[in-house]
Amino acid sequence: MRNSAKHQWIYAWLLLSPAMIFLITFTHYPAVQTIISSFFSTGRGRRKSVFIGWDNYDTLLLDEVFWKVLVNNFWYAVWTIPLSIILSLAMALWVNDKLRGRSFLRMAYFTPTVLPLIAVANIWLFFYTPGFGLIDQIRGLFGFAEQNWMGSPDTALYSMIAVAIWKEAGFFMIFYLAALQTIPPSLREAASIEGASKFYYFRRVAFPLLMPTTLFVSINAVINSFRLVDHIFVMTEGGPNNSSSLLLFYIYEVAFDYWDTAYAATLTVVMLVILTTVAIGQFFFLDKKVHYK
């Protein structure tokens, strides 16, 4: 019996080892190395990297651009996370019902997700082109003046938010649609027999059963709100005056434009701390409301 149990443990570790090796190599080791690098200076040429303690973090506290992009990222997350989740749930509820062209609607909603990020950015650049873009063409029919959507500090960030919601809603819809199809039809039939309205059934039956999916989608939405680079790089390059720059794009600029990898590591540590804190908070807040089968 002991040999059999020992063989099972060995077999289990052999099965787990490939995933563990990849996880440690490409996730845990880089994270630890990034934390260590944040306490060193950036080596350039013959000047080697040296230990400088908390100097990078002191620089970060005095960095006006960092605080500006952090505020941008806050508002970006505040708008994109709830709106993309609400929109994806509404789309999933609609295409889950029996209606004509349901397959076409599902494909249309999911299409933005499979488009390359650079292609999406270029499509929306055409929409936002002052005077000639689709949005200004439609606004012109109602007598509105031209608007430089991407060139104005007041509208650049919100223009990026609209692109992100359009891109992510279809992706999250797939998860909600799959979850809706796992709900037994007998629950809806029983609610109908009892005279419950569709809204009451959704609020009391369907939505509580969708909470595991909502938890998963919300965590992914938070992560996505901090990892946008491609659209900014193509559409605004963080301008004007960093009004559309987000934290990860700023990290990219510091690391590859200014070649200050140590300070970029410091910024990355801050971002990891923010994401970890928010994810833990989501689990504590939403897990109590999740009804697991």
Image (cartoon, rainbow, N blue to C red):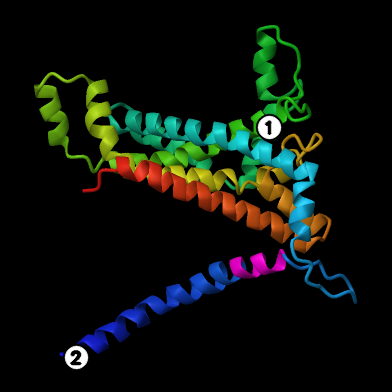
State the mark number for residue 157: 1
Query: Which of the marked residues, 1 or 2, is nearer the chain's N terminus?
Result: 2
Question: In this view of the protein, which residue sits in the foreground, 108 or 22?
Answer: 22
Disc 1 residue type (three-letter): Leu
Q: Is residue 43 left or right of residue 181?
A: right
> Where residue 213 sits: x, y (%)?
35, 44
Kindly indicate whether the residue at mark 2 contacts the one at mark 1 (C-beta within 8 angstroms).
no
> Where residue 84 sits: x, y (%)?
49, 34
Instruction: Say above or below: 197 vs 23.
Output: above
Disc 2 residue type (three-letter): Arg
Which residue is depicted at the point 67% across and 14% down?
139
The residue at which mark 2 appears reads as 2
Which one is closest to the eye, mark 1 or mark 2? Answer: 2
Q: Is residue 111 magenta?
A: no
Q: Which residues are magenta?
A: 31-38
Instruction: Say above or below: 26 vs 60.
Output: below
> Where residue 292 sits: x, y (%)?
25, 47
Quadrant location of residue 187? top left
Q: Main secondary structure of the magenta part?
A: helix
**Image quarter in which the N terminus is found:** bottom left
Query: Farthest residue in the top direction?
Result: 143
